[in-house]
Image: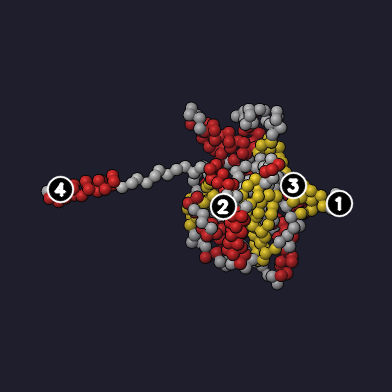
Amino acid sequence: DEVTSAVAELTKLKQELADKTPKAPAKKEFNRGVFEDLLKRRFFYAPSFELYGGVAGLYDYGPVGCAVKANFINTWRQHFVLEEGMLEVDCTSLTPHAVLKSSGHVDRFTDVMVKDMKTGDCHRADHLLEDVVEKMLQEPKITPELKEELTMILAQLDNYKKGDLGRIFAKFAITSPLGNELSEPVDFNMMFATSIGPTGLLKGFLRPETAQGIFLCFKRLYDFNNGRLPFAGAQIGKAFRNEIAPRSGLLRVREFEMAEIEHFVDPLNKNHPKFKLVAHLEVPIFDACTQMDGKQPMLMTLGDAVSKGIIANETLGYFLGRIYLFMQRIGIDVKRLRFRQHMKNEMAHYACDCWDAELHTSYGWIECVGCADRSCYDLEQH
């Protein structure tokens, strides 16, 4: 009885102490608008040409933004270029038409666009569909069958071509945000066209990626490396993409900094001597089959993913591991990270296997890094 009484008294005292202890404030939802306004007021970055009304998708970095960007680039260079002994190049942004024709960008570097038939406003079709589907899913009277269908549409959104999007737009009678009729979906090439020289006869583009410069320097880099494989070329520089409808702050803009690596390896032996250093890393794998089944990503070691053929080879697995470690190094919450494999019908024209490191942000899941086995496509094209 004395023990029972003592326990009861202690329980009472514990409750009284808990009642007197200040409660932790409830976790607030992240307010992206307030955060972005703060960044602009403190001039981390701001829209370009504000005095002239601004241009969508173009931004200027202020003093603090420049410092953050410089620190990020220096960390990337240290983690990849210096620690891996890569060969860095700095190539021109102006690129002749013939180069990007050979690489496939002239014919295939496109997004699907729809146009408001009344106002002429252009919209990226997959983004418009995503917005409409998300609103439909919030309807209180939605049927389980429709909810399942819409959820599957969202899961496979990145896979749809213009024909697929056209059929979905027609099925759900999707209109523009203003309620106007939309055009049929069409492919829109995202490269900025220009001419080189005073005659205007030499057509060119602002580069949409930095990789082609590395490929064109392959022979010189190979000779520099004394004719030995494997080796890696790296480049940090500006890229330009004529986005249909820039949005999501700095995530989808028309001029931006890229940091790219092209690792050249014997196509008959894609093992990596340092793969064992990352094979133990347990990362969230969102492979193509899992996506098709509508399931969640699974935690798996890179060693298991390679041995089971989910990741194509050790070299690809090694760099996924290095990307994971880089994310940790710059302070990314790895609980908000996943590696998503491209499905066959969304695979880039140059890739035989491709994975995106995606981060869960206030905008949803966003591709942050692409890691692809481009095979010999680019070298053979050039």
Lower sequence index among marks 3 and 2: 3
Find the distance from the CA under tag 3 to the CA under tag 1.
Answer: 18 Å
Kindly indicate the quadrant of the structure image that contains residue 257. Answer: bottom right
Q: Nearer the viewer, residue 362 or 278?
A: 362
Q: Image point 16% across, 50% down: which residue?
A: 6
Could you tell me which secondary element the residue under label 4 belongs to? helix
Label located before the other in sequence (4 or 3): 4
Residue 132: tell me if it is visible: yes
Q: Which residue is mark 2?
A: 357
Q: Alpha-carbon distance for marks 1 and 4?
A: 97 Å
Judge depth for marks 3 and 1 and give the one in front: 1
Quadrant of the drawing holding the C terminus: bottom right
The Cα atoms of the two marked residues, 1 and 2, are separated by 43 Å
The disc at residue 192 is: 3
As measured in the structure, the alpha-carbon distance from the residue carrying label 4 to the one carrying label 3 is: 81 Å
Give how far across and how far down residue 342 sits, in percent.
60, 48
Which of the two discs, 1 and 4, labels the residue nearer the N terminus? 4
| Dots 3, 1 in contact, CB < 8 A | no
